Amino acid sequence: MPEGQLFTVVEEGSVTSPIGFSAGGLHCGLKKTDRHDLGAIVCEVPAAAAAVYTTNVFQAAPIKVTRESIASSGKLRAVIVNSGNANACTGAQGEADAYTMRNAFADKIGVAHDEVAVASTGVIGELLKMDRVLGGIEKLPAVLEAGEQGAEDFSQAILTTDLVKKTIGVELTIDGKKVRIGGAAKGSGMIHPNMATMLGFVTTDASIEPDALQKLLRQVTDLSFNMITVDGDTSTNDMLVAMASGLAGNQTLTESHPAWEAFKAALTHVCVHLAKAIARDGEGATKLVEVRVEGAVSDESAQAIAKTIIGSSLVKSAVFGADANWGRIIAAVGRAGQPVNPDTVDIALGDIVTLRQSSPVAFDEDAALDYLKGDTVVISVQLHMNQGKAVAWGCDLTYDYVRINAAYRT
Amino acid sequence: MPEGQLFTVVEEGSVTSPIGFSAGGLHCGLKKTDRHDLGAIVCEVPAAAAAVYTTNVFQAAPIKVTRESIASSGKLRAVIVNSGNANACTGAQGEADAYTMRNAFADKIGVAHDEVAVASTGVIGELLKMDRVLGGIEKLPAVLEAGEQGAEDFSQAILTTDLVKKTIGVELTIDGKKVRIGGAAKGSGMIHPNMATMLGFVTTDASIEPDALQKLLRQVTDLSFNMITVDGDTSTNDMLVAMASGLAGNQTLTESHPAWEAFKAALTHVCVHLAKAIARDGEGATKLVEVRVEGAVSDESAQAIAKTIIGSSLVKSAVFGADANWGRIIAAVGRAGQPVNPDTVDIALGDIVTLRQSSPVAFDEDAALDYLKGDTVVISVQLHMNQGKAVAWGCDLTYDYVRINAAYRT
C-alpha cells in the first residue's frame, strides 16, 4: 500500500472478497427474461449486522422482516434478495410471503429464521409468485460459492433495468491483519417500470460490534447513498445492509480503536463508489454529474443546496445538452431554502469559472461545450459564507429517461 | 347570471375588460424573431396595487424596483414588461437598467416614477439592450388601447416559448354595480432556454383598499399559482401584480363587505384559470394533470402531498405514457414528509379506483388507458385522516421537455 494511503482498492473485489462470505444467484422465474432474479449472500459465522432503510412511509414487507431480524440479535447469517417484484403495497399476504421467503431460506441453509434478512425490488402492488421463489430457494444453496462467480451471479440477480453490475472491494490492515470490505448495489430501473429501488450490500471480515457498525453505516450513508439523486423519488424498498464476519482476526473495532478512521475511510470509499455507480447508471443517463458545494453555513446546509442542484430537471437537461447554463444552477441555489449571500457566489463547470461574486464571468463557450460533452461533469459552487461543504452525485435528464418511464407496464 | 353563481366568465375577457385600463405591446428588438417583446398595462387613475414575488434568494432587478414602487404608496398607474431577457444576475448595471426602464416609461406617460412596476422574463446573466428598450418605450404609448387588440398585444408581448396566450375575464355585481376582473399570464419557456418564469397580471375596476387587495392576493396565490409545478424550479423573476382602478363605483371592499366572498371567489377563479393554463402549456406538455388530495391532517399538509405528487418525474412520465402506475403515486405520498396512515389510502385516476385502504383494487386497464390518453388527467388521493384538502396542477414529462431544455443556448 502506498505511503499515506489508508486502504487499497482490490481489482475484481466483491461481496465474497472478505473471509467467510459466499454468494450466488439464479433465475427462478420472477423476471420475464431468463436473467437472474434470486440471489443470496451467506456468512459462515453469525456476522455483526447493520442496515439503513428508506424513509418512505409505505415501507415494503421485506423491510419490516429485515428490521425484525436485525433487531433480534444484531447478527445475520444471510440475506436473500429477489428482483422483478418489490413485494410492496401487498398487505398481509405480502408480509406473510416475506416471512415465508426468509424462513424457507433459513431452514434450507440451517440457520435461525431471525439470522436472515430479505430484500426485494421490482414492480409494486403485485403478490410474489411464491411457488417460483420457493423453487428457487431449493436450488440456491447449490450455487453459493466464495469465489468470483458467486459474487458475479449475486450482483446480476439484484439488477432490474440497470445496465451494469455495481461491485467493489477494498483492503486495509488493522492490528497487523488484512481486513477486506466488499460491496454490491443496484440502482434505478425495473422490468415493469415502476419505481427506482436502491439496494446495497456490504460485507467485511473486520471484527466490529453491531452497534458501532450501525452508527458507522449511518454516517457513511449520509455521505454516499443519501447524496445521490436520479429523479428525486424515494422507493418503498430502499435498503443498505452491512455484515461483518470478524474472521480477519483484528481486535474488535470501536471508535477508540486507532484504525477506526482508516476503516471508516475504507467503508466510505466502498459506499461512495457504489453510490456513484448508481448515479452514473441512472435511468437513461449518459453521464455522471458531481456537485460540490463549499463555503456554506454548515455541512447540512451544503448538503441541502447540493441536492437541490443535482435534483433540478433544468440543470439535468442542460447537462444532457452540454449547455453551460449556470443561470439554472444559481436559480437552484437560490430556491434551496438555505442561507445564501446573493452577492458572493462563485460557480464553475470543471475548471471553467462562469460566475464570480455573483457576477457573470466571460468564458470560452467552446471549451465549456467540450467539457460538458465528457462522461463526467463537475459543478462547483463556492458560497463564501463559512466552512460547510458537501458533494452530491446524479445524472443528466435524457429522452431515454422519459422513454423508460413512460412505457406502459404491460 | 344564473342563480347561486357568484360571478360569470366573460368571453374574450382580458386585462382591459375592467374600466380604466388600456394595454398594448410591440417588438422592440429583444427577441430574435419579430414577435412582441415589450408591453404595458396602464390605468387612467392611480390603482390600488398588490404583488407577490418569487421566494428565490436571487431576485431579479425588476422585482426590487417593483417592490419599491408598490411600497411607496400602494398605488400603481402602470406596469411595463419585457420578454427575451430576465435582467437577472446582472448586478448594479441591471438594477440601474430596471430603474431607467421604469422611469423612462413613467415620464413618457406622465406619471410619477414610483407609480410604475417593472417585470422581465427571458435569459439571465445578460444585460438588457437598453437602446432597444428605450426605443420601444418611445413608441409604446401610441399602441396602448382599452379594447381587445391592446390586451391581445400585451398578452403576446409577455410570452417566451409559451405556445398560447393566457387571458381571462370575469364579472360580478357588488353594491348594484358591475365589477370586472381581468388577467393575463405567461408560463414556462424562453427564447434562449434558461429558466421558467411565471408572470401574472390582474386588473379590476373594483374599489378595494391596497392592504385588503394584498392580503387577498396572497391568499388566492396560495390556492392557484403556488399550486402549479412544471419542473420544480423556482425562477428569479416570478411576479404576480394586481391593480384595482376602483372605477366600477362599488363601496370600497374590505373583509366585512357582504360581497367580499364573491369577489374572492371571482379573483380565485381568475388566478386558478391562469395557473391551470400555465400548467397545461408547460414546456413540452401534452396534457394537464390535476392532483386532488383530501382527508389530510390539514390543508397545508394536503398541499405538500399534492405538490410532491405533481412534481414527481416518475408520475409525470407515467402520465405521458398513459400508464396507470399508482405505485408511483403512493410512493410520492409516502415521501412527502407529511403525516399519513399507511393503511388507509385510496387512490383514483379519474373515476377509476386503483387503491382502497392501501390495498390494490382490480381495475379495467383498457378503461384506464383510455382515460389517461385524454388531455386532462385527475389524480385523487383520499387519506382518511382528517379534513385537510388541496388541489395542485402540473403537466406530463415528455421528450419535448428534454429537447427544449437540452438545447444549447446559442
Image: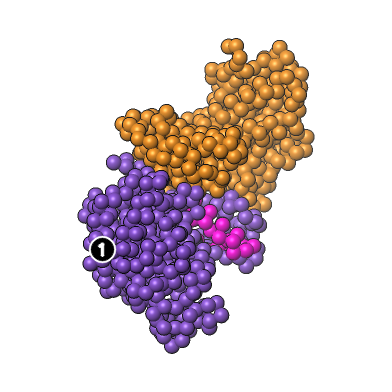
Chain colours: A purple, B orange
Q: Is residue A199 visible?
A: yes
Q: Quadrant of the N terminus of chain B?
A: top right
- Tell me the SS state at disc 1: helix
Does the magenta segment cover residue A313?
A: yes
Of B115 and B208, the residue lying toward us: B208
**For residue A246, which quarter of the picture?**
bottom left
In the image, what residue occupies the spot 73% across and 36% down? B70
Q: Residue B370: image x %, image y %?
A: 34, 29
Of B254 and B339, the residue lying toward us: B339
Q: Which residues, given as a range, are shown in magenta?
A: A291-315
In the image, what residue occupies the spot 64% across and 52% down? B91
Q: Is residue A373 visible?
A: no
Query: Which amino acid does the dot numbered 1 rest on?
Result: Leu
Of A316 and B237, the residue lying toward us: A316
Q: Give the tally of numbered discs.
A: 1
Q: Residue furthest right?
A: B73
Q: Residue B35: image x %, image y %?
A: 49, 33
Circle 1 packing at 10 Å, graded few (<14), some (14-19), many (20+), is many
Does the magenta segment cover residue B82?
A: no
In the image, what residue occupies the spot 45% across and 43% down? B330
Instruction: Describe residue A196's horizontal placement relative to residue B80 as left or right.
Output: left
In the image, what residue occupies the spot 64% across and 41% down? B53
Kindly report the secondary structure that dominates the magenta region of the rendered protein.
helix
Q: Residue B101: image x %, image y %?
A: 66, 40
Instruction: Describe residue A230's horizontal placement relative to residue B39 as left or right.
Output: left
Query: Badge 1 sits on which subunit?
Result: A
Of A398 and A322, the residue lying toward us: A398
Q: Where is mark 1, residue-wise?
A: A140
Q: Residue B307: image x %, image y %?
A: 53, 41
**For residue B86, which quarter of the picture?**
top right
